[in-house]
Every structure is written in C-alpha cells, then in structure tokens.
Image (tube, rainbow, N blue to C red):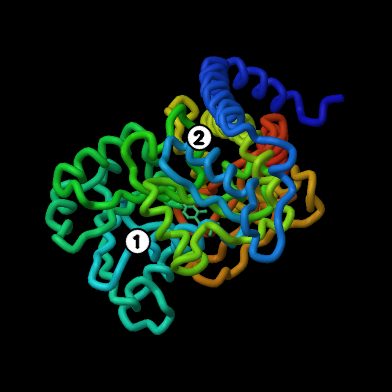
Amino acid sequence: MTIFSERLTTMQTQVEELITGRIHAIDRIVDANQWKVIRAFQQYQVSDFHFAGSTGYGYNDRGREVLDEVYAKVFGAEAALVRPHFVSGTHTIGTALFGVLRPGDKLLYITGKPYDTLHKVIGKPQDGAGSLQDFGIEYDEVDLLSDGGVDWELVRERMTPNTKVIGIQRSRGYSWRSSFTVAEIGEMVRRVKEINPAVIVFVDNCYGEFTEMQEPTEVGVDMMAGSLIKNPGGGIAETGGYIVGRRDLVEKAAYRLTAPGIGGEVGAMLGTTRAIYQGLFLAPTLVGQAVKGSVFAAAMFEQLGFITKPSWNDPRTDLIQAIQFTSADHLIRFVQGIQLAAAVDSHVVPEPWDMPGYEHPVIMAAGTFIQGGSLELSADAPIREPYIAYMQGGLTYSHVKFGVLTALDQMINSHLL
Ligand SMILES: *Cc1c(COP(=O)(O)O)cnc(C)c1O
C-alpha cells in the first residue's frame, strides 16, 4: 500500500539516496554512545533490584545512588544528580544556577539571550519573585556576532572580577542561529579559563545529549544540566532532570533542590527509577532516530527550495531542525501535518494561539506519549515573518518520515506546493 502520491514517494527515494552517507555517520555516533551507556551500566553492576524505587525519605536508595554514578560516568563528570523531582528543564537549570551563585556574584551568558523560560528565572532586581536578580545576583549577556560566533571582545569586557558563572546554551533553542558543537564549547571553555581560571562554566545541554560522540562535560565544562523529557530520558522517563559536573558544584545544586545538609541523600524515587535507567539505555539510539529524521526533513524541504537550518549536510549537535517557509499558510499546514501524522492525538487540529509569554501567536504540534516530551516528534512555530517552523524529535526515523510526507501532502492538497 502506498499512502503518499507518486511525486512524494519518488522524492522520498531520491532523498534517502542522497543522505545515505549522513545516515551511516549517525549510526557510528549511535554505536559510540550506546556502547558508552552499556559499559557504564556494567561498571556499576546495574541490577534488577536497583529499579525497585523507594518511598518516604528514600534513605539508602541504592538504585538512585547508582543512577547518579552511571550518569556521571556517561557524561565524563565527577558527579551527577538525576531526579524525578526536577519538574522541567527550566527547574533543573534554575536549581544548578541558584545552587552555585550567591548575592553579589555575576552570571554572564556568552551565547546571547538564553531560552525563553529562563528569562523569569534570571528575573529583574527586586522583582519580588525570588529570581536570581531579586536575590542580588548580577546578570549580563553578550549577544552573538552576526556570523553566529561568540563576541570575545565584549566577553572580556563584561567578565568582571565578580563573574562567578559563564552560561553557554548549546542548542539554538527557537532562534535562527547555529547550535554550538562540543568542539566549539571546548574552545569557549579554553578561552574563558584563559581570562579567569576560577570561573564556573555552565552549559544548558537541552536537546544536545548523544547527538555527538562527546558531551560538553568531557571537554572541560564544570557543570551542565538537561531535561529527562528530552534526549536522555529516551522517550521512557516520565519526568525529571539531571545535573552533572564537578562534585562540589553538583552537591551545591543538590542542597538547593532539597535542603542544605540533606542534598542528594534523600528523595523517594516513587517507582520512576526503572524508566529513568531504561530511558538512558535507549536514549543514544532514539536520539539517532530523531537526528536521522531531521536530516531527512532538511533534505526534503531543501529539494523543494526552502531554507533550512541546519542544512541536511551540516554537522549536527542537537535535535532541532528549523525550516523557513514563505508564508503563514505554509507554516500552519506544516505544523498541522506533523500533528496529523502522530500516533497519539492525530485527530486534533492545532491552531495558532496567544501563548502567555510570547509576543506572536504560536502554533504547536505535539502528539506525544509523554506530555511535552520533545524527543518525540513535535513542531512549533511563532506566526511571524520570516515564518520559521522548528521541528524536533521522533522516537522512530520512520515516524519522522511519515510526519514530513504527511505535512508535504497537506501542503500539496492546499495548493501550496
Ligand atoms: C527545553 C529547553 C529548556 C527548558 O526546558 P523545559 O523543560 O521546557 O523547561 C531550556 N533550554 C533549552 C535550550 C531547551 O531546549
């Protein structure tokens, strides 16, 4: 049975031929990361009884302790804090930053404005919200240069003696910039430490895990955080986040998550443990599936004359595929097509709406098993020029292809292509 028109099926075949080399390269990354994860499980002798979970205080939860060790090993870090008690990526990143920053310290982001949800965490002086700036932590950011690089001249100027933490966002998030590869982040660490070796380099690793052979903590980053409903949760972890890095810093973050003196030694896992382990086990392979899907999507849309970022042939360091359309109609049809291709909630038709915190109406497709799970195929687009849709995820490569072809089919039926 062919579901799609001959025109689309022919295009699919051509594109799959075109991207063969890239797909093989992704398989090599998957193997490296999959084997790294398995070896970490083996080293710490992960056993069935580790999955049992705990209740109450969760004292001596061996599964939780070993989970932290396994994460630390996988990310090449001294220590880790992996918990279902982190409600989101934002909460995890916020906990890491609040953990290490003190009144009078300065946080300097060197990769431009951070991800939207972090703006309120950083806050404003005296905003009464208990934000970083409300607590007397100074904040500044250095915009990226027009070529997408770090503006080192300004960084040097803004790195004052009280600058305690340098913030780096690996993924483009929802902006039309390039994401930073692990090699580029390593270079940033080197340059920042040249200016002040004592500064803590923090990386927001959301969407980046397992897209490359190495992680930022393997190239000198001091502390890093991410979400379990993105890459490292492997589509299985139901909630949570992780912080990895230097032991002293991870401990401070643990004090912030629970309480000083208590840290990571308590916290009932409430039956979440097995899924977090299994998710980590699956993550390298599922991230590979999603990345293959992104390469396929980029190649298909480029064949049709659209501008994509990254291009199908560019190196990748995160899940996000940006596609620039020529009209709001294209954008809406594309997002609706992705929803229509979902296994869950395919009967729902997304419409643009005025989402709190956004200046323009936003349309989102998310037919996911885990609410908001963005290792699963999803797409978002603010309805404004230059009409960029951001798609990410896909638990299976085949599903991403189905999504892209369905979206294109929708666009063709609406006489947009
Ligand atoms: C998703 C994301 C966050 C925030 O995570 P939430 O789970 O949405 O709170 C932060 N930074 C980046 C780059 C992200 O992609």
**What label does residue 100 carry, if any?**
1
Place of residue 222 in the rendered image (x, y in percent of width and height, measured from the top left): 34, 46
Which one is in front, 146 or 228? 228
Label 2 CA crowd tier, 10 Å (few <14, some 14–19, many 20+) = many
Q: Which residue is mark 2?
A: 74
Which one is in front, 334 or 367? 367
Label 1 CA crowd tier, 10 Å (few <14, some 14–19, many 20+) = many
Q: Earlier in the sequence, mark 2 or mark 1?
A: 2
Q: Is residue 56 left or right of residue 224?
A: right
User: In the rendered image, which quarter contains the N terminus?
Assistant: top right
Which residue, as the protein is rendered here, is positioned at the far front?
Answer: 60
At x 30%, y 49%, the residue is 201
Which one is in front, 91 or 277? 277
Q: Is residue 197 left or right of residue 22?
A: left
Residue 253 in sight here: yes
Which element type, helix, strand or loop, lies under badge 1?
A: helix
Which element type, helix, strand or loop, lies under badge 2?
A: helix
Place of residue 134 in the rendered image (x, y in percent of width and height, measured from the top left): 34, 78
Query: Which quadrant of the structure image shows residue 120?
Result: bottom left
**As shown in the figure, which amino acid type bears the numbered disc 2?**
Val
**What label does residue 52 carry, if any?**
none
Distance from mark 1 CB to nearest ligand 1 atom below 8 Å: no
Which residue, as the protein is rendered here, is positioned at the far right?
Answer: 1
Q: Is residue 233 left or right of residue 32?
A: right
At x 27%, y 54%, the residue is 143
User: In the rendered image, which quarter contains the C terminus?
Assistant: top right
At x 68%, y 39%, the residue is 278
